Image (spheres, rainbow, N blue to C red):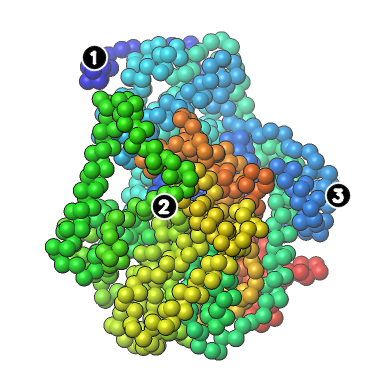
């Protein structure tokens, strides 16, 4: 019997096995008013889930984004109650910090005062010796049954849903496609579940009939499940939230689909369909395993759920929060705040004593790096080897909102933070190539990819896969396996690497214009009008370039004092056998490298017509200033320069000097990173070889530490931080408020780079405090799902989110210290307050304690802290006197 026959059989009418006497106490969701309330609660449950981007566009995501409208401490109580998740480190972690002197009694005392707690340092030091009770969670039906039954129904249900989602959302990994691609997630699952004999093997008879009896519409299924399970209306939001968290990885993936649809002005209900599937499984299992004991136990659970309650589909009420042992939560909050005060104390001390540098001279070179914390180290090294240089910090997409189509590709890749949408689609070409040369190069590449694709299809085919492994696999792959094991292999090419020869490859780069006729057909419509999203333009029109250039320079606070060479340095990473490699690339470029953005911006700023337009707008860029794009490889700390072939001949000597300075800066940077990599004490040549070998080692789980340790964001002139060793823990954004008319740049910084930095910070935070819920576990056990969707830990279970343990812990100690981001802005108070007042997301993050905000004075080095609801207080004042309540 084939699939078609089984599908026909499935449509045969059958009676659902749903005896009324086996149902739980009924809840009422049938009235029109009930439907409206249910719709709001479904939306609220889905909103609590943070999105998850695919591996090839891996983006640092705040895992608590859906709870940003709740105070941090209350959000911690919600996550603990609903999902058993932790948002604080174990007490032993803080006990070690107190014992080592990193957290002092003054820090404990100050933290208690900030948190409004009456705990004194002695009480807190006693508290760190006692771990709080284990977290509970809203019990799903399958979890209750697990306690009564020998079978692990919770894992079974998650595995079956994950299996279906992996097939349904597959992005090209599967050789055999799912037969129901044209259906919705819920509809295809009903077809899949009716034919899935795994449930039969678990003793679930009559599965086909019971699945057929489920409502056709997902929302009707959700309503029916809540009614049949007897979930009290007051507990429906928490129960649905718990159900989504039970399959949190796939919930995050479907939340991404809604996020992307909303950015485009549409909507997507796939996450609601996933919720319907998970609740349907509870009903199916309950009806299958029903017994007097289960019915009695489940009635007690529902009664307890009804006592918790929620208010208006929002955060938990005070009564629910109090039931979570508020004393433990208070202690944890104070300990976290004490660790943050300890870090802030040291950073504030550095910022107060920083000496302003001399900016009167024309620098030998200016280098604008991404604000990424890894750039802080290489910037300091570059300024050390070249004291006459000036470095700047700016978001790695350099302010140009593009999506990029690599040469020969058929899809575009976004190069803006995920909070923004691209306005232009830029394509790469072989510069100077005639149609014949372009055709020849691309035909060669396509033959290579065609052979590779055919070879993959053969070795994965049903008729050849077993014989292939037995007869050919070891002989064909043994040399590669040996080379990879010994670190002889070259790094895997980037996805857009067309494997051209060196001469051709050096001529490949993005163009500002719409693709020429000679190249357009190679992009299969990706750069043509048919391939564009609404509001996106092919190329960057000449009429837009001057305004873009002005906005970029003003946002960089680069409006005068130009050097002859201005370097724009994006960043990326090099590693092999690393599913999360894109997570080490530029967060401001949506998990891509900053190469395309740097090259596009340099081309715009070097355009003579743009220079003339800038002069008319009051920006006089000297005729001898040239913008040069580059890319910082954060794994090996090399800086590669691009488009040097179009650099005027008069810059040859300066280019040679620049290459020398960059080489020396790379050496200094590698020396500083060596200790964290476990390579301290080695000689320079041995150290360099070891670091480069890590980038080629297929077994290396820590090619670099990424953004581990990130803790602060500073927007100020470089003179405020010049010469300070900030330990590679700080996002540095250049900003001079005196050159910011109307404080538009300040608002852009607070609503984009600051928020992106907060997402990065909270992703690292969540992955550290509870890696099981907000991270991705052991990297060694990862298996890629669906081509690039994400990873499983092992061969089954839920899709994993967040960072692997190896990105946070070196096997002996935590490399990342989980602290909420401390933001320092050098700007007047009034515009800061006004920007907060008119931007809901920024206000939520600040007022609810998801990050800390400080303001730096220009002249006296004074620093003030913003306390939600209290205004600004002077840091270090004896009594913390309020200056603006």
Q: In the image shown, does 468 or 515 lie closer to the viewer? A: 468
Q: Name the element at disc 3.
A: helix
Comparing labels 3 and 1, the label whose residue is closer to the camera: 1
Q: Earlier in the sequence, mark 3 or mark 1?
A: 1
Q: Position of residue 693 (x, y in %)?
A: 50, 53
Q: Are marks 3 and 1 in contact (CB under 8 Å)?
A: no
Residue 1's label in the rendered image is: 1
Mark 3 → mark 1, Cα distance in angstroms: 73 Å
Q: Position of residue 127 (x, y in %)?
A: 80, 43
Q: Is residue 770 left or right of residue 244?
A: right
Q: Is residue 551 left or right of residue 524?
A: right
Residue drawn 60% across the image and 86% down it: 358
Comparing labels 1 and 2, the label whose residue is closer to the camera: 2
Q: In the image shown, does 77 or 756 lie closer to the viewer? A: 756
Question: From the viewer's perspective, is residue 595 above or below residue 25?
Answer: below
Q: Is residue 73 left or right of residue 193?
A: right
Comparing labels 2 and 3, the label whose residue is closer to the camera: 2
Res. 199 in view:
yes
Q: Which residue is mark 2?
A: 491
Examine the image and state in which quarter residue 664 appears. Answer: bottom right
Residue drawn 32% across the image and 19% down it: 195
Q: Position of residue 528 (x, y in %)?
A: 20, 59
Mark 1 → mark 2, Cα distance in angstroms: 47 Å
Q: Position of residue 718 (x, y in %)?
A: 57, 76
Residue drawn 59% across the image and 75% down it: 384
Circle 1 residues within 10 Å: few <14, some 14–19, many ≥20: few
Q: Name the element at disc 2.
A: loop
Mark 2 → mark 3, Cα distance in angstroms: 54 Å
Q: Which residue is mark 3?
A: 122
């Amino acid at each position: 019997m084939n699939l078609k026959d089984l599908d026909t059989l499935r449509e045969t009418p059958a009676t659902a096995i749903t005896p009324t006497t086996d149902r739980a106490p009924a809840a009422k969701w049938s009235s029109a008013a009930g439907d409206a309330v249910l719709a709001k609660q479904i939306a609220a449950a889905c909103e609590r889930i943070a999105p998850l981007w695919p591996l090839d566009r891996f983006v640092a995501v705040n895992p608590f984004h859906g709870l940003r409208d709740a105070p941090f401490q209350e959000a911690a109580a919600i996550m603990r109650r609903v999902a058993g998740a932790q948002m604080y480190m174990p007490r032993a972690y803080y006990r070690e910090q107190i014992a080592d002197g990193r957290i002092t009694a003054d820090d404990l005392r100050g933290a208690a005062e900030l948190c409004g707690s009456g705990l004194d340092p002695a009480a807190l030091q006693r508290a760190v010796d006692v771990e709080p009770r284990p977290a509970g969670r809203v019990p799903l039906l399958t979890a209750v049954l697990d306690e009564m039954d020998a079978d692990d129904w919770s894992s079974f249900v998650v595995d079956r849903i994950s299996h279906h989602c992996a097939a349904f959302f597959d992005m090209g990994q599967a050789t055999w496609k799912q037969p129901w691609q044209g259906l919705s997630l819920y509809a295809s699952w009903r077809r899949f579940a009716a034919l899935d004999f795994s449930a039969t093997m678990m003793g679930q008879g009559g599965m086909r009939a019971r699945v057929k009896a489920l409502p056709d519409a997902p929302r009707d299924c959700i309503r029916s499940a809540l009614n049949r399970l007897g979930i009290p209306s007051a507990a429906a939001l928490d129960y649905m939230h718990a159900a989504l968290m039970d399959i949190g990885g796939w919930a995050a993936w479907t939340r991404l689909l809604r996020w992307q649809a909303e950015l485009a002005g549409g909507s997507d209900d796939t996450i609601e369909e996933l919720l319907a599937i998970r609740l349907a499984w509870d009903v199916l299992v309950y009806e299958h395993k029903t017994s007097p004991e289960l019915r009695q136990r489940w009635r007690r659970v529902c009664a307890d759920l009804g006592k918790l309650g929620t208010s208006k589909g929002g955060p938990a009420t005070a009564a629910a929060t109090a039931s979570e042992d508020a004393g433990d939560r208070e202690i944890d909050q104070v300990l976290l705040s004490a660790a943050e005060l300890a870090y802030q104390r040291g950073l504030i001390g550095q910022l107060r004593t920083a000496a302003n540098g001399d900016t009167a001279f024309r620098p030998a070179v200016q280098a604008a790096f991404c604000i990424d914390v890894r750039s802080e180290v290489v910037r300091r090294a570059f300024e050390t080897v070249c004291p006459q240089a000036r470095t700047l910090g700016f978001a790695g997409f350099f302010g140009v909102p593009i999506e990029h189509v690599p040469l020969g590709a058929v899809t575009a890749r976004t190069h803006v933070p995920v909070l923004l949408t691209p306005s232009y689609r830029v394509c790469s070409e072989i510069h100077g190539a005639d149609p014949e040369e372009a055709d020849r190069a691309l035909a060669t590449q396509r033959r290579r990819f065609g052979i590779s694709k055919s070879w993959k299809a053969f070795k994965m085919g049903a008729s050849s896969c077993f014989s292939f492994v037995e007869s050919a696999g070891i002989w064909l792959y043994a040399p590669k396996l040996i080379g990879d094991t010994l670190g002889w292999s070259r790094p895997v090419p980037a996805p857009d690497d067309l494997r051209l020869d060196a001469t051709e490859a050096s001529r490949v780069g993005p163009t500002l214009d719409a693709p020429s006729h000679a190249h357009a057909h190679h992009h299969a419509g990706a750069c043509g009008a048919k391939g564009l999203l609404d509001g996106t333009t092919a190329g960057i029109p000449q009429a837009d370039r001057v305004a873009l250039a002005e906005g970029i320079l003003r946002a960089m606070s680069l409006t005068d004092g130009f050097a002859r060479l201005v370097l724009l340095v994006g960043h990326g990473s090099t590693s092999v056998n690393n599913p999360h490699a894109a997570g080490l690339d530029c967060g401001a470029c949506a998990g891509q490298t900053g190469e395309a953005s740097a090259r596009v911006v340099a081309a715009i700023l070097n355009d003579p017509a743009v220079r003339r337009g800038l002069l008319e707008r009051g920006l006089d860029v000297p005729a001898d200033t040239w913008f040069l794009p580059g890319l910082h490889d954060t794994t090996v700390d090399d800086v590669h320069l691009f488009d040097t072939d179009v650099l005027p001949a008069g810059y040859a000597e300066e280019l040679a000097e620049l290459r020398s300075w960059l080489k020396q800066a790379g050496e200094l940077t590698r020396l500083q990173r060596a200790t964290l990599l476990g390579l301290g004490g080695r000689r320079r040549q041995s150290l360099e070889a070891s670091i480069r070998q890590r980038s080629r080692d297929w077994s290396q789980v820590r090619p670099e530490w990424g953004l581990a340790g990130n803790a602060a964001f500073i927007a100020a002139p470089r003179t405020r931080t010049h010469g300070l060793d900030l330990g590679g823990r700080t996002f540095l954004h250049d900003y001079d408020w005196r050159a910011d008319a109307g404080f538009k740049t300040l608002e852009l910084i607070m609503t984009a780079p600051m928020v992106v930095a907060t997402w990065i910070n909270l992703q690292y935070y969540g992955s550290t405090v509870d890696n099981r819920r907000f991270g991705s576990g052991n990297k060694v056990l990862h298996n890629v799902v669906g081509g690039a969707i994400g990873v499983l830990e092992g061969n089954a279970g839920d899709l994993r989110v967040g960072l692997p343990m190896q990105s946070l812990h070196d096997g002996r100690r935590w490399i990342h210290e989980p602290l909420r981001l401390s933001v320092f802005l050098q700007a007047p108070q009034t515009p800061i307050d006004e920007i907060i007042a008119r931007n809901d997301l920024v206000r939520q993050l600040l007022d609810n304690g998801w990050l800390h905000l400080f303001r730096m004075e220009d002249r006296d080095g004074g620093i003030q802290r913003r306390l939600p609801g209290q205004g600004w207080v002077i840091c270090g004042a004896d009594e913390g006197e309020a200056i603006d309540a």
